[in-house]
Amino acid sequence: MDSAQAAKQIAALSAAHHARVGNTRPQSGTNSAPLLGGTTPGYLSSNYDLSGSSPQQANFQMPTSHSSSASPSLVDSMSHSAPRMTSQTTNATLGQRRQGFLQGLANVMASHGTPLPPALTGIPNPNFDPSTSKWKNLEISSELGAIRLGGRDVSLFQLWGSVFQSGGGQAVAANNGWGAFLAQFGLPDEIPQRPPNVGTVPVAPMIGSLYMTMLHPFEQHFKNNLQDQQKRARQARQGSTEVMGHNRLPSGPHPGQSQRGPSTQSTVVPPSPANGGLSYSLSSLQQPESTPPIEIGSSTAHAVPNGFPLEGNVLDQDIQGIKRKMEYDERDGKRARQKTGSEPPTENSTSAISPAVDRSSSATTSNLTPQASETMQAPPRPRQQPSRRKIEYVPLAREVETYGGRDLSALETELATLPQRRPIRDVSEWGTVDIEALTMSIRSRLATELSYALTTLTLLSTMRGPTAGSGFPLVQASDLFEEVLDLLEEQAFGGSESPTADPPYAMPSITTYRDLCHLVYESESEPFAVLVPRQGSKDASSGPLQRPGDLILAITNIIRNLSTVNDNWDFLSRHTRLIDVLLRLCTVTAHGEHGTLLPAASALSLSDLIRVRRDVLYTLSTTAPNIQLSTSSPRINLRMAIRSFHLIASYLIDPVEAVPPIASIHLTGIPPSGNPKPPTLADTALEVFSRLSQLDSNRQIYSKHVPQDLVFRLFEALVHRLPVVDADFQLMVREPWLSYLEKIVLVLYSLAFLAPPELKQRLKADRALGFRGVMWRVVQKLLMNHEMRGFYTICSKRAVEAMKILDDAEDCFDTSKSTAPTMSFGMGYGEVGDSSSERGTGLLGGHRDVTWEILMLQEVGKDEVFFGELESLSRVEC
């Protein structure tokens, strides 16, 4: 090989080396987008001037240094990113961002002629007039930059960040998505209206109106300034690229190689908008007229290192093999250390042309081959050059709302497309029902006839009449109903209970609902539990006959369904036998030496008993207002009073469940930020007792037959259920929890009313119970709430009445005392018929300052009874 051929091979190797080094020059790497409420140190955090450069509008500055250090796509992605909170953001930085946001918001709203209250933003504004401002009805929180809505603080900074992240105010309003932000601030779906208005109003439209009125102008200014900053940044990048275009490739001869023609020079073309300002191309090469121009992307065109053209026959098969091996070795090096574009350029790189990067395909165009000179004797053979790509792996995540591997959103969408379910049939669609045939079927006691009759009654009990509240009328089928009760007593007890039976003085203590559930869980968790014969199990010798427990459950379900019909309320509530039989079914007795608890009905198991007690409780909830516990038989009165009290107290007195509202939510495991409801069975039991004890005759029955210890246990459990901490009272803005609190107060009033004087003294003096302190805190918290005071007045009045009854410590059923003097003197100045002043012993004497403050409230002053009772509780009379 002569010296000329050796020089050509050396030049080819040098060209391959320079092309490889030029292609591997680091590009501007990616950077993580700023999170909500947080910014990157060099871009958003220090250069967004939210405070505003002028008093008229906020100024958002963008640094120009990014034009040379970051790729345009990176700047665009950062520019379009909403500010989000990072986990590394300190409290000081967060406070600065919030202060800057409030400054910018105040400036923007001032430029619109609607300045915000200085108490909201912390920025004084001499143009703000509280008497004429459109923001005068806003309730501003004690926290800077937040307002009060539904008893909760709503931060404007957090609201703006969340809406901006969701696409902006217009996008959220178009999708009607304001309700998605309620849980973030712990807001309920609805809040009561301000007095004197009644009812509730939805909260989601209020959040939308607040954002579009106050924060949407600021959002528009923010987006406009962001677009201006991006435009100036692109212009700066294009200007710097044009300056680079004047730097041409060196044209001196390569050492060891002769120059066969005029030197070629290349220029860098400014980036075009089509490629995003990233791709560079060679526009022209200065060559002799006979030489065609070089085109980028051709398989025969190659890059000219150091400005020298190379002959095509130099890159023979051996040189190509060496070059291809070097490329594969370089790929292995990339696998070991992936370059992100943040490394500085290598010192040995002599190429002045920066490789093009196409982010859409993550590919890098490389390996530009040299152009053959005009003295080439044979055209170069076209070769397929291996492409070199930089692969970026972007993890993909799909957020799917699943439960047990099932996509709930897809299921709901499919159910929405299905045809609507057929409504419940009207009772008239059955035509004429043969009541006599159903009666004879039940009376026959045949298995098939019982199945037919009970199935027909179950269907009839679920159907409704043509008018609201109407259904199957029991008044027209009294004989059928009596046969059903006979079947119920026969299957459960073997016959009816004698009216002269001894009263159940030896009944065990109250078995709570929680105790029954634990007993069922323990018994069913034992090994081979299904093989152990227990009470209520089906007798193997009965063959295909129904289990008696199933017949009892079917009958109690029918009675529960019929109790929801308004036309049947009076009939069921005045049916003394029905109430007595249902309460007897709920009885629990102790058996054996160890006192094993079993249902009083031998056909029922413990799990059956839990279902029966629940059905009876719901039945009593609709019929309780008209139930008369006082009958002609004293023994029946005693049985119904004790059994009903045991049933109701079993859902209320368990010490684990008798806790304040927020603690009861934690027991269920439901997050308080959602929409939790009060415990269903406890709420129903409170409703039953408040209705049963509404009549003085029923209160007298309870006072006469229920032991004082049971009354004290129930009273103590209800005091423990009262709200205590602020989190408890925040739940009271929701209607279900307010109703729950009112029922507790009503039951406390009824228990205090029916308690004998010695028990009242015990309740009032028990310091461990703390009834006075807890109840007074409830009254104070409810009446000092300026927004919801009108809704809390009734509950507060009943609480004061309960304290007044305990303070008097008198027998409420004693009618021997005269309510008016026998004689009165004077004309027009007597006290006959006039309400005399209340007397008290100073139950609230230690809280006189707060008591007098509450007495000055309008809602208290206009109610003479309420005012007199509360004032008497604060006086100490000798």
Image (spheres, rainbow, N blue to C red):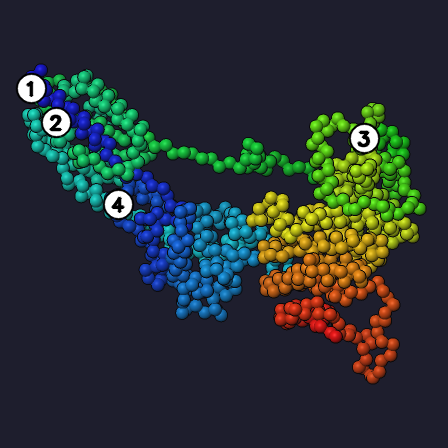
Image point (42%, 34%), residue name: 396
Q: Which residue is mark 4?
A: 67
Gap between marks 3 and 1 measured at Cα? 110 Å
Q: Which residue is mark 3?
A: 547
Which sits in the foreground, 680 or 720? 720
Q: Secondary structure at mark 4?
A: helix
Q: Is residue 234 left or right of residue 738?
A: left
Quarter of the image with the C terminus is bottom right
Q: Where in the figure is residue 694, as x and y percent of width and height?
A: 79, 57
Q: Is residue 6 above or below residue 793?
A: above
Q: Mark 3 and 2 residues: CB-CB less than 8 Å, in contact?
A: no
Gap between marks 4 and 1 measured at Cα? 48 Å
Q: Mark 3 vs mark 2: which is more N-terminal? A: 2
The amino acid sitting under disc 3 is Arg
Q: Which residue is mark 1?
A: 3
Q: Is residue 857 visible?
A: no
The amino acid sitting under disc 2 is Pro
- What is the residue that sits farthest to the top in this orientation? 1
Q: Is residue 616 left or right of residue 770?
A: right
- What is the residue that sits farthest to the bottom in this orientation? 826
Image point (50%, 59%), residue name: 147
Q: Residues within 10 Å of mark 1 (few under 14, many from 20)?
A: few
Gap between marks 2 and 4 measured at Cα? 34 Å
